[in-house]
Amino acid sequence: MTPIEVDIGLRDGTHHTSRLDVVYGNPAKPLSRDDHLGKFRGNCAAAARPVPRNVADRLIERIDRLEEVADVIELVDLVAA
């Protein structure tokens, strides 16, 4: 997925190029927690069967306390509902 390079050619014939060797979200440049959760919520909303916001929030709460979850079926039930 990296590096990413973009080259823009202008009408006057000049070109401007930009290159990213490490993108945001790469282990070398990890997402912040807020951005990570925003991406998760966005993916939930864009799914073929969208996951409602309140369900996504409950998933986040449970995953944040994963060691306290007695049975992972709790997570599956939230997604499958």
Image (cartoon, grey):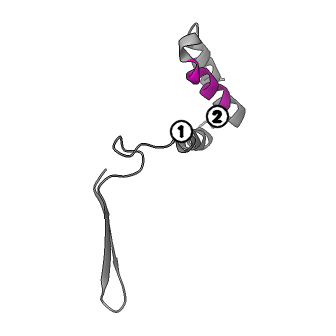
As drawn, the label of residue 61 is none
Which kind of residue does numbered mark 1 sit on?
Arg
Q: Mark 1 points at which residue?
A: 33
Q: Which residue position holds label 2? A: 51
Residue 59 or 79: which is nearer the viewer? Answer: 59
Left or right of residue 36, residue 4 in this image: left
Disc 2 residue type? Val
x and y, in percent, of residue 66 in the image: 55, 17
Q: Quadrant of residue 27?
A: top left
- Assess whether residue 62 is covered by the magenta stretch: yes
Q: Which residue is drawn at 29% across and 56% down?
A: 21
Q: Give the range drawn in magenta.
A: 57-65
Q: Residue at x 58, y 11 (%)?
A: 68
Proximity of marks 2 and 1: CB atoms separated by less than 8 Å: no
Query: Neighbour class for label 2 at 10 Å: few (<14), some, many (≥20)?
Result: many
Closer to us: 42 or 21:
21
How many marks overall?
2
In the rendered image, the vertical position of residue 11 relative to residue 19, given as above or below:
below
Q: In this view, does 4 lie above or below 61?
A: below
| For marks 2 and 1 on the same chain, the one whose residue lies earlier in the sequence | 1
